[in-house]
Image (spheres, rainbow, N blue to C red):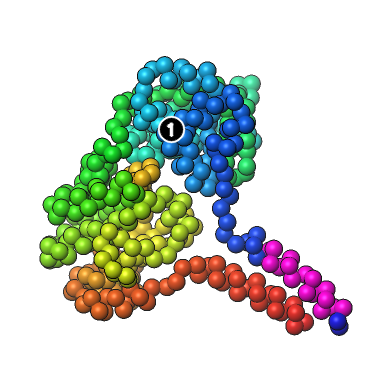
Amino acid sequence: MPQRNSTLLLSLPLFFLLFLSLSPTSHAHNITRILAKFPQFSTFNSYLSKTHLAAEINRRLTITVLVVDNAAMSSLLSNGYSVYTIRNVLSLHVLVDYYGTRKLHQLSKGTTLTSTLFQASGAAPGTAGYVNITNLKGGKVGFGVEDSGHLNARFVKSIKEIPYNISILQISQVLTSAEAEAPTAEPSALNLTTILSKQGCKSFADLLKATGADTTYQVNIEAGLTVFCPTDGVIKGFMPRYKNLTAPQKTSLLLYHGIPTYESVQMLKTNNGVVNTLATDHANKYDFTIQTSGEVLTLETKVITATITGTLIDQEPLAVYKLNKVLLPTELFKPTVTASPSEADGPSADAPQSDDQAAADVNANGARGVDGGRLTMVLLSLCMGILLM
């Protein structure tokens, strides 16, 4: 028996190693550090830092970077583009999916369209932010911006692949796009309500301007801002309830749809839990809970659960996402016990709620890391079961 216990005790470290391997981790990569080993890409690497694309690449969990050599970059720079326009062009070379050498040569039907950081920026109209990848004769692979109608670049070789985290592939020349090469305003000159109005959230933008809440949003952009905007159809269905709110309540409701930090999609998926909003005036006031279920991201307020249905812009320091419902805080609306499956753009009309009751409900929000806690308990139970055998 002592010998058996000793064997079991010696095996315990293996269980903890198993626990660590199953725990959520991020596969960190550093694009500038990787490319620093290849002097032929020094200009491309330099502009990843100058345009702040390097930070965006490093924070994403799955990414493909299409690099070009110094000669190809010289051709791009000879056009005299501003650094903001160069950022758009290079954003076309960052695919928000993983494409290793094997995947390139095993494309379904021999061709595919993939989204880029230019598409995520919100500055790409139509399909201008998508890259076409097509297998050509002789085992060659062509790359081209979808709206350009031609494959102007060819796959040269793989530089670095860390499945399925980051893939760095060399292509023959810079991808061309009239939209990406157009003059681009500085980030500080970007106007949130203009961005909202052009991409299906004009009604929400109009409400922001009518209440003056747009000023609060705008001043937060430089430091980092995430906005969740109900689409025009959602706002239209909610207007009868909105009109019953007082002026201060309207402002609070609108500010409730913003977080004073930049959160990419990957960051939202990783950082589930309770978050404060622009409407938060002190602890446990005007917050909501972010939850992930597979690829679906939801925002829960105890009154309603809204789903993120699309991205208007995801470019540090600003991210804007579309919602299928108006977020209803417990400070203004009664919490619901169960959500109706047939619920439309918002729940049925509710009377305003007292601050004391609302605070109690908000404090009842669940803690973060439920899945991680369950995993820990399962593994510890396994260990204890073996020891007691």
Camera-nearest residue between 30 and 207: 30
Can residue 107 be seen here? The reply is no
Please provide percent x and percent y for residue 362.
Answer: 33, 73
Q: Which of the image's four quarters has the C terminus?
A: bottom right
Can residue 315 be seen here? The reply is yes
Does residue 127 appear to the left or right of 174 in the view shown? left
**Residue at (27, 54) in percent of width and height:** 230
Q: Mark 1 falls on what kind of element?
A: helix
Does residue 6 appear to the left or right of 283 in the view shown? right
Q: Does the magenta stretch include residue 15?
A: yes
**Residue at (43, 32) in percent of width and height:** 50
| Residue 280 against residue 183 in the figure, above or below | below
Q: Count the marks: how many?
A: 1
| Residue 128 against residue 317 in the figure, above or below | above
| Residue 128 against residue 228 in the figure, above or below | above
**Residue at (75, 83) in percent of width and height:** 388
Please provide percent x and percent y for residue 78.
Answer: 42, 16
Is most of the magenta stretch helix, strand or loop?
helix
Determine the image quadrant of residue 179.
top left
Q: Name the residue type under label 1.
A: Lys
User: Residues in magenta?
Assistant: 3-18
**Residue at (48, 21) in percent of width and height:** 73
Residue identifier under label 1 = 50
